[in-house]
Structure formats: C-alpha cells, structure tokens
Image (spheres, coloured by chain):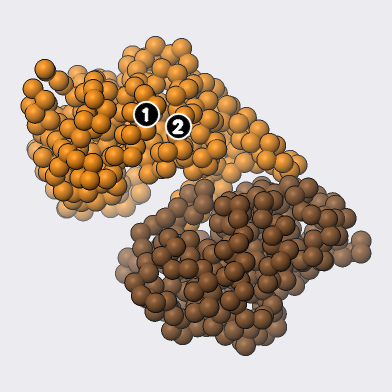
Chain colours: A orange, B brown
Amino acid sequence: MSVHFVTREIGSLAKPPWRVKAFAGRPLEESDFAAAEEWGRRLEVDGHETLVEGLRAGSLGLPEIDDWAAFYAIRLLERVGLDVVYDGEQKRTEMYDHVAAFAPGFEPRGTVRSFDNKYYAKAAVVEAPSVPGPQDVEEFEFVRAHTDRVVKVPLTGAYTMEDWSYDEHYGHEGGLGASAEHRFDARRRFVHDVAVNVIRPNVEGLVAAGAEWIQIDEPAATTKPDEVPLVVEGFNEATRGIQAKKSMHICFSDYSALWPAVMDLEDCLELQLEFANRDSRELGTKDEDRPGYADTLALFKEHGYPGVGLGVLDIHSDFVEPAELVRDRILYAIEVLGDPERIQVNPDCGLRTRSWEVVYEKLANMVQGTRLAEDALS
Amino acid sequence: MRAFAPGIYPRSAALVQATRDLERGRTAPEAAAEQAEDDLRELVSVQRAAGLTFLSDGMLQWQDLFRPLADATEGLDARPLTRFLDTNTFYRAVLVDGEPRLRNPLPAPDLPAGEWVGTLPSPLAFARAARDEVSAEALAANVLAPQIQAWVDAGAALIVLSEPFAAREGSADELLRALDELPAAPLALQLPFGDAESILPALAEARVSVIGIDFYATSLGALPSGFPKEILAGVVDARSSALESPDEIARFVDELSSREPAAVYLGPNGDLQFVPEPIAREKLARLGQASARLAEVA
C-alpha cells in the first residue's frame, strides 16, 4: 500500500523583527540586519542581499518590506518540505483585526484584557457589515506568484467575527430583559451578514483569481456550545457552491460540542483540529499513549466525518516533537479511523507564538515524521 | 434608587502600559503602583460623580477573580490559563496542593468605612476554578469566611460573591450548602453573564440578602413574583460596548419593581473589565443617571 499524507501549516507565523520594527517606526539594529541576512541565506531567498541593503539604507517602503516578509515565510514553509503553503499571514495584523479593520460596519472600540497584563483589540458592529470587494486577492496573487506548491488561503470565519465583536446593531435595541430567542436571532443575523457580505465576496474573488483551497478559521466555534449550528450556517453561507477545496480549522475548543451539527457542513473536506496540545510526549500507538487524540478521533469515527486535519505539533511549546512522535500520532489516528485517506497532517494551529528557529525544526520534523508513517504503512 | 458596580473594572490605558513596562523592566514597581493609585482615585471620582450608593475599588490589582485569594491561601496555587465562560478572557485555574487555609486576609480597599463594596468569588466558583479538587464548603469555611469577616470588620458595607457558573449548571444545591458556611454578614450573590431562571426559585432560600441577576441573559419573566430577596439588577451590559439609555433602564426597572421583589439595586451584569475603560466610565455615568431618574419619579 502506498500512502501519501498531505502536509501543510495552518496560518500565521511570527513576523521577522525587521518587519515588526519597520512597521512600528522603531530603528532597526544590527541584529535585525543579521536576521534578514541569516534567514535569507538559510532559506536561499533569491535576492535577499537587496533586502539587507535596503534595510540598512532605510530605502525600502513598508509595502516592499511586507512583500519580503511574505517571501521569506513562503520559502521557510517550502524548505521544511510542506506540500501546501501560504505566506504565514505576514501581511495581516491579526486574524480578527484584519477583517474588522477592512469591512465597513465595524468600528474599533479599544482593548480588553485577555489574561494577566495581555490585552486584545476589539471592534463593534455598528451597522450591517459588507465589503466593496474581495479583501485578500492581492495577497493570494503574491503567494501564487512566488511558489509552485499548492496554496491554501486561511480566512477568519463569520461566527468568530461575530463572537469576538461587540454588537451595537443587531441585538442592542430591546436587549434588556429580552428572551433567549431574541438574543439568538440577533446573533444569527450578525453571522449571516458577515458570511454573505464580508467572507463570501472574498472567497469568490480568491477562487476567481485561482485559489484552489479555502480554509475557514473558527477558533470561537464552541465557546457557546448551543450556537455551533451558527458556525455551520456561517461556513455554508460563505462557501456554498464555490468550486474549490474547503476546510475548517478549529482549536483549543471542546470538540464534543461540534457534533452532530458539523455533519451539516456542506462540502467541507476536513476539520483541522488541535490535538498535540492535549497529548503525551511519549511514543506509542495505543489508546493510553495518545490521550490527546483518543476522544476526538472517536467522535470522527462515531459520526463518520470524512476528513481530519491532524494537529501533530503543539504550537504553545518550544518542545520540538521528534519525528517518531509525529509518526506515532499519525499511525494511531489511522488505527482509530481505519482509513489513511481520511487523514492529513498539520500543526495544531498557526505557529506565530514560536520563533522561526523553533518553527523550522518543528515543521521539518513534522514532515519527516509523516514520511516515517508512510513508510510504516508501506 | 440605589446603585453600585462591583467586580473587576478595566485598567486605564496608562495603567495597562505601566504594567507592561513593569513586566519588561522598563519602569520601576513604584511607578506602576503610582499609576494604579491614580486609576483608583479616578474610579472613585467617577463613581462619586455618578452618585453610586457604594464605592468599589475596581479590583484594579486583581489579575482575575481568583488569583489574589489563591495566592493568599495555603494549599492553593495558580494553574494554566482557562477560558472564563464564553468570553475571550482567561483566568488561572486554581491548583490544590494541600488543605486550603487563608494565611492572611487580603487588605481592605482604601475607601471610607461603611461606603464600600468588596467582591470575592463565591465558594462554588472558587471550587469550580479549582476543578473541584476541594469542596465549595471547605473553601467557604476556611478561606472565604475569614476573608469576609476581615473586610466586614474593616468597614465593608456589602460583600458581593461573584458566581458565574451556577446559573449555567442549572443547580444551586451545592452553592446553598457552601453559603451556609459563611459568617452572618451583608452578602450579595451575583450571577454574571448567565440565564438565572433555573436557579432563582432555589436562591430564595440562600443565606444572602441580595441576588444579582444579569437581565441581558435572563428574561424579566424568569423572576418569580414577590421574590423575597433584594435584587441587584444587571441593567448595564458589561459585555457590550453599546451605551445604555437611562430612560430604557428606568422603564425596565419600573416593570421589574411591579414584580415586587424585596428591593432593587441597579448595577452592571458582571465585571466591567469586558469593555475598554472609557466605555466603562460612560456606563457608570449612565447607571447613575438611571438611578437618579428613578429616584425623581419615586
């Protein structure tokens, strides 16, 4: 039996220090030039000397620096051997703000505590949001022009946009003392409008420009378990009838809440989920060796969901998963699901909280471990 | 009409920056502490200007609802991050590594005796944060009871116990047993960000005088007529940036009063830290305006 698992990343990578400082208006230091030089050489980025010279001379505009960051990220993902790549979301501020700042109807409201002394930006929807055209076509075309690998475009999903926003439009009037149905209806209308008038135009534009794979990111999918049907509606409304591969990424969530609602996802190739974060670091392919995988894979099996994007790298740790650990996680998943065709391989989530050095090692081992699993099956 | 705002209040942009700078070694602890004092002075001034009945210190130094109390308790420690309900804000779960016992009570806020309200986790919330590795009753008896007593002795007019989990679980039995372990004191039980309908009848028997209800998650019809407790009506939505209309609040409270609870206080439906500080400040002002409007009518 010859098996090939498709390997890919999920979304964001950290931005190089020279990109961060340039956009923050802070002076670049020798270490920044050295980083551009070192990674340019290591990744064999064509013309990286031009970047280094431009950074030293201060002669590059921000759009050029953005392009270089994306170019470096694409090369990194190629060099580690991934089958499917993007640009590490180098040109986006952050997955929520990227959309909220673009779509009329959202207005920034300030920052709110995430935990301890960490804060995140939050916007309010003040009228039905809509966009004048697709948001990410230019970004996609840049990636398409700089790689011959398969390209997968990550997009923030409608439900997550709704859940992470303040609502000053849909449910505000008459909210005090209102029924649960009133509140649910307001949220549903919000999700619908984002899916149809914000996400879908982008999906249509991307596919018209040649995108072959759209990944909808819904990290908020299970924060309100009884609203998982809204996640599904948002996906379907944003992608229905679109001729491209479509998948959904969800992470750090209670996956048991996804079923049975996700069975109504239309033409969703797979659910790419985080598993490694919950797993042991010991080798082995028995149930007890793989506590992070057993329960969720059992749900895939029980409900017969067609495909799983198997998270095999913990993105919250610098621990570099040995290739053999990646191999065992894949082999275990096959043992549970009984069919290698249902499995593809990825990190738990975007790797933006890890250094490029760690990312490189993790992803390289992920690819190597995947090949080991293929060998074992052959 | 009496009004107050318990719970965690958002830090100002200046205090957020000061705490970040402190973490990165860019400022001295004294400078961050000074900014925290400025924030507190400002918060007190905003509450006074709004005419609120009780003052709160906004728990400006608290990282989350549990941490300072867990840090002050033998046998408890901080654990990994855990999502707070269905928000995008996280708290440190509580690690139980011994018999929990409060070492020294947390100091009382620097506010005039008899005029301030303090906020603590309810015993059930504390137990849930500790993943039930210790019972709510034990936490009530050995941690919360001495803390409550210390604050009452220091001049607290009311202690609000924040209970975000019970309404979602739909059961109050365990909570009621734990509340029985607390000393006789002016206590409120607030149920932030949840539909309280399923447990309201049981809470009529709770050993607290005030029940806080989130009326952005609980329909008015859920409140039994003639409810024997005072109600802290969550009429300002701490999870929404939209500003409430004082007139709408006043109309709602009229309706609420027609159900004849023992008494009504006005407040937010949970910690105001879920909106940025300038919005929270405006919400406090509107809370005060609604309260004044109702007082005029009365």
Left/right of residue B202 with respect to residue A345 in the rendered view: right
Q: Which residue is drawn at 59% across and 44% down?
A: A166
Marks 1 and 2 sit apart, C-alpha to C-alpha, by: 10 Å
- Quadrant for the N terminus of chain A, please: top left
Q: Mark 1 lies on which chain?
A: A
> Residue A207: image x %, image y %?
38, 15
Q: What residue type is labelled 1?
A: Glu
Q: Which of A56 and A198 is in front in this view?
A: A198
- Tell whether label 2 touches label 1 (CB within 8 Å): yes
- Residue A11 at x, y percent in the picture: 31, 35
Residue that carries the numbered disc 2 in the rendered image? A259
Kindly tell me whether residue A21 is visible in this rendering: yes
Give the numbered dot on residue B173: none
Q: Where is residue B133 in the image (x, y as percent from the top left)?
A: 41, 65
Rendering quarter of residue B188: bottom right
* Residue occupying the point 37% across, 66% down: B95
Kind of element beneath mark 1: helix
Task: Give the residue at mark 1.
Answer: A302
Estimate how packed mark 2 is, as few (under 14), some (14 to 19) or many (20 or more) residues with alpha carbons within 10 Å: some
| Label 1 packing within 10 angstroms: few (<14), some (14-19), many (20+) | few
Name the image quarter holding residue B189.
bottom right
